[in-house]
């Protein structure tokens, strides 16, 4: 029997536990800053799963599945989906305001998030295969680009530290222009 928490557990595993496990295996300790960065990704993943459920709503209802979309109906699932994206982008905006350099690329995904909300609304109001395909593509794009932009921002933030640890490349960031590029001085 289904627990009804499939979307939550799938999102927890895919967007939090997998990256966290990889980080712990590499760094051998838990980093609270990483958990803060993974929170927006968690909400985007749940929103993506809800978007995936919309095209299957009728079949899932007949099969008596307990997906979020079946339990809430598509109109309310749209509201939850929109709220999850707002929470995710709100967290990203907050992290950008407190000057977390890992999120500097993620902010540019906000227009794509708006497109996803628009397509979800269209798919609920006018359920056609075309809107379902666009919605699914937008949901995948927002999640994949969110993960990629957080990874890219984290790597760019940590490149000076990584390079300073390599004996061959020490001193490469002594040039002032390269210190400015990474937006923090290297001493």
Image (cartoon, rainbow, N blue to C red):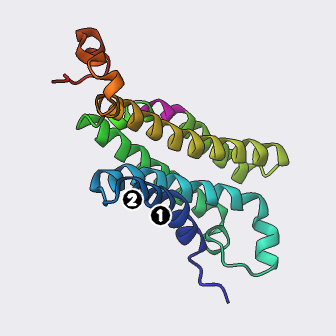
Q: Main secondary structure of the magenta part?
A: helix
Residue under the point 39% across and 30% down: 156
The quadrant the N terminus occupies is bottom right
Where 53 falls versus 125 (above or below)?
Answer: below
Q: Can you tell which mark lies on residue 76?
A: none
Q: What residue is disc 1 on?
A: 17
Q: Position of residue 170 (x, y in %)?
A: 28, 23
Q: Is residue 137 left or right of residue 43?
A: right
* Nearer-the-camera pick, 30 or 114: 30
Using the image, determine if residue 108 lies above or below residue 26.
above
Residue 43 percent across, percent down from the top left: 48, 56
Residue visible at 72% across and 78% down?
Answer: 65
What stretch of residues is rendered in magenta? 107-111
Whichever of labels 2 and 1 marks the residue nearer the N terminus, that label is: 1
Q: Which quarter of the picture shows residue 107?
A: top left
Q: Considering depth in this image, is 91 or 104 the residue closer to the camera? A: 104
Q: Which residue is mark 2?
A: 24
Secondary structure type for disc 2: helix
Within 10 angstroms of label 2, few (less than 14), some, or many (20 or more) residues? few
């Amino acid at each position: 029997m289904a627990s009804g928490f499939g979307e939550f557990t799938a999102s927890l595993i895919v967007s939090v536990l997998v990256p966290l496990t990889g980080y712990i295996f590499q760094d051998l300790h838990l980093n609270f800053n990483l958990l803060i960065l993974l929170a927006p990704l968690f909400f985007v993943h749940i929103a993506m799963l809800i978007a995936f459920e919309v095209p299957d709503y009728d079949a899932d209802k007949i099969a008596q599945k307990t997906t979020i979309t079946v339990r809430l109906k598509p109109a309310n699932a749209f509201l939850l989906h929109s709220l999850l994206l707002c929470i995710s982008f709100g967290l990203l905006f907050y992290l950008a305001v407190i000057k977390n350099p890992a999120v500097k690329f993620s902010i540019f995904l906000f227009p794509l998030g708006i497109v996803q909300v628009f397509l979800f609304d269209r798919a609920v109001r006018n359920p056609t295969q075309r809107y379902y395909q666009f919605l699914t593509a937008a949901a995948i794009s927002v999640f994949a680009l969110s993960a990629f932009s957080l990874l890219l921002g984290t790597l760019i933030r940590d490149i000076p530290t990584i390079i300073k640890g390599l004996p061959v490349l020490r001193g490469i960031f002594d040039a002032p222009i390269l210190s400015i590029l990474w937006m923090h001085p290297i001493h």
